[in-house]
Amino acid sequence: MPESAEDYFARIAAAQDADGRIPLDPEGVLAWDVFPFEAEGLRLKPGPVPGPERVRSGEDPATCQCAQPPARGPREPFGVVWEDEHFLVKAPPPSGAPLMLSVVTREHLDVPEMDADLAAAFGRLHVALVASVEELPSVGRCHVMRIGDGGAHAHWWFLARPVNLPLVLGSFMVDWDDFLPPLPLDVWAENAAFVAQRLHERLGGRAVTALT
Ligand SMILES: [Zn+2]
């Protein structure tokens, strides 16, 4: 029988000190060469303590982002840069990564509700998108995430990790994306348009690459 949430919480509570904080192990992640912070003075916030799950945006389809027509083009915030009958690929506003793209289903559903055909189509898109992002000259790797804690509509993040910056590696890229200087919109849009065009060449569908 899988462990209950209460038993999981009890083990966390047992690990917390008199201030309610979990002590950091200096030999653990703090000692990794790619850990982006200096360890001195670093400590966790008190907690975590049990509480209700946060309500996600779009739990009600009527208020979900999919109820409105999406923006289009690589210069628009979350503008569609590629689409087919199943998925939209959108470009969020510029951040510190060479590029980040989000993939959403056309249909309002969450990942566990995807049928086998949609799952297969997502697999093909996943591979083609990773390959296309990794063709960008400033990119070392395309990281892929499904988190799903903010929005109820199925979505994934494709985050381009810059090439040849040995401190910027692995899961810390999510943090570096916020710390590195945001790309100029023109550069961001050109990278997004390049990937959309390569995706079209690999997979078909329709690229929306107009830069003006
Ligand atoms: Zn939706």
Image (cartoon, rainbow, N blue to C red):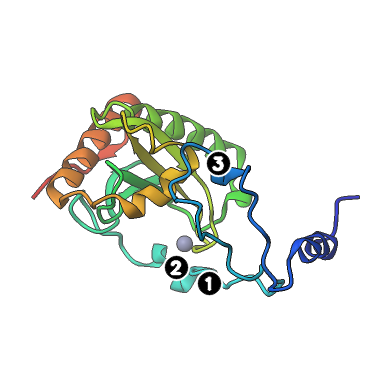
Identity of the residue drawn at 27% across and 41% down? 98
Closest to the camera, between mark 2 and mark 3, is: 3
- Distance between the Cα atoms at labels 2 and 1? 6 Å
In this picture, is 46 found above or below 72?
A: below
Q: Mark 1 belongs to which amino acid?
A: Asp
Q: Secondary structure at mark 2?
A: loop
Farthest residue to the left: give it: 212
Q: Name the residue beneath numbered marker 3.
A: 31
Q: Position of residue 124 (x, y in %)?
A: 46, 30
In this picture, is 209 found above or below 18?
A: above
- Distance between the Cα atoms at labels 3 and 1? 44 Å
User: Which one is earlier in the sequence, the residue at label 3 or at label 1?
Assistant: 3
Viewer-proximal residue among 112 and 148: 148
Farthest residue to the front: give it: 40
Q: From this viewpoint, is residue 1 visible?
A: yes
- Given contact means CB atoms under 8 Å apart, are the residues at marks 2 and 1 in contact? yes
Q: Position of residue 156 (x, y in %)?
A: 46, 47
Q: Name the residue beneath numbered marker 1.
A: 60
Q: Mark 2 belongs to which amino acid?
A: Cys
Viewer-proximal residue among 17 and 127: 17
Q: Mark 3 belongs to which amino acid?
A: Ala
Q: Name the residue beneath numbered marker 2.
A: 64
Viewer-proximal residue among 27 and 44: 27
- Given contact means CB atoms under 8 Å apart, are the residues at marks 3 and 1 in contact? no
Query: In the picture, residue 158 is in which quadrant?
Result: top left
